[in-house]
Image: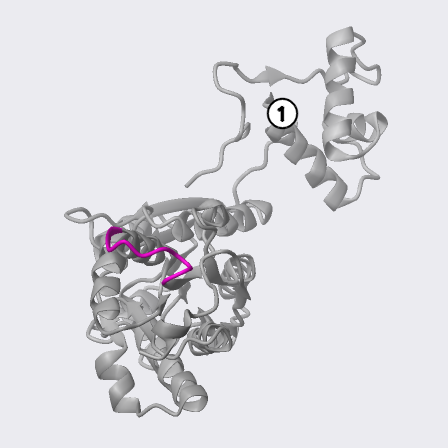
Amino acid sequence: MTQQAGAGRPTGRPPRPIGVQVGSRPVQSTPVTTRLADIAAQAGVSEATVSRVLNGKPGVAATTRQSVLAALDVLGYERPVRLRQRSAGLVGLITPELENPIFPALAQVIGQALTRQGYTPVLATQTPGGSTEDELTEMLVDRGVAGIIYVSGLHADTTADMQRYEQLRAQGVPFVLVDGFSPKVQAPFISPDDRAAMTLAVTHLVSLGHTRVGLALGPKRFVPVQRKIEGFVRAMQEQLRLNPETIETELVQHSLYTLEGGQAATNALIDRDCTAIVCASDMMALGAIRAARQRGLAVPRDVSVVGFDDSPLIAFTDPPLTTVRKPVPAMGQAAVRTLLEEIGGTPAPHSEFVFMPELVVRGSTASARGDRARA
């Protein structure tokens, strides 16, 4: 995922070079003056500051310089050659797929953070029938990456062989693991608090009068799934005094982390008289809404739905989705910071850094209907 100068450039218009000084005298022309004004307005600085940045002059704060460079990219101007950073090295980022919008969002945060530190991110994505995590790892190592960040990889699968990560460490390749923890791997882990996420969702729904709350999530062998179940069962126990065995057998439904998976799980939970569904991803939540509508039920009048992630654009669905926001910016930046410490020879503790999620209430949840709540 190598970021290119000019990202966000309007289509159909080639990059435009910026005039810079020749010797000590600026090139005077109306187009250049206009461009300086545009860049200054976009960056929120003076034209003189823009000129200093473009000409590589000292006396400009690093944050201000970064704002000017970002303005160049947003407006579609080509950076002067002297301002193009030399990469400090390649860093691999391995994700399971890009169809779920939370993965591109996380990749963007990680990619931007790496670029700011002078590294070039290389995105390697698994697809069904395509390269495996091990094959992608080998490819990145062969290309001499300085380190690797894994997102929702095999480290999250309790049935997978964790020896692969120890072999990678033995090769001297630093790495950080995001979403999923294993005590068998000596590495830094970055995770959201999945148990707390379920407490937030259940507390919200119970406060609305729901007493039959279902949980739709992925296969049980994954660590985030197990943690969500633990949090869900505990919250339902504490708030509704339900038997733990009853909760797991009647109110938890495993499926796939897809729209279709959410739809199938929701159909099963509605058949068990659930009036509210907590989903382990926003994609599953969209499937839950589809399932309810196909049964002639309205969301949130008849069924309330809560997602997980707060993926980009999810606030604009119909209805806007109530969800538990995954702290993506904080997690992505922490993953990069931790990896760079590993690369720099001052490794962070080989433990799990856990980030607190946040409930975002929108239009897909409402008070339980009296007749359904008593079912």
Q: Position of residue 252 (x, y in %)?
A: 27, 76
- Amino acid at dot 1: Leu
Q: Position of residue 340 (x, y in %)?
A: 53, 60
Foreground: 267 or 259? 267
Q: Is residue 205 magenta?
A: no
- Residue 89 seen from this side: no
Q: Nearer the viewer, residue 370 or 220?
A: 370
The residue singled out by tag 1 in the image is 75
Magenta part of the protein: which range? 294-302
Estimate how packed mark 1 is, as few (under 14), some (14 to 19) or many (20 or more) residues with alpha carbons within 10 Å. Answer: some
Q: Residue 177 placed where, x, y %?
A: 39, 66
Query: Principal SS element in the magenta part?
Result: loop
Seen in the picture, residue 26 relative to 110 is either above or below; the reply is: above
Q: Is residue 99 left or right of residue 15?
A: left
Q: Residue at x 41, y 87 (%)?
A: 240
Q: How many marks?
A: 1
**Residue at x 43% of width, y 75% of height:** 198
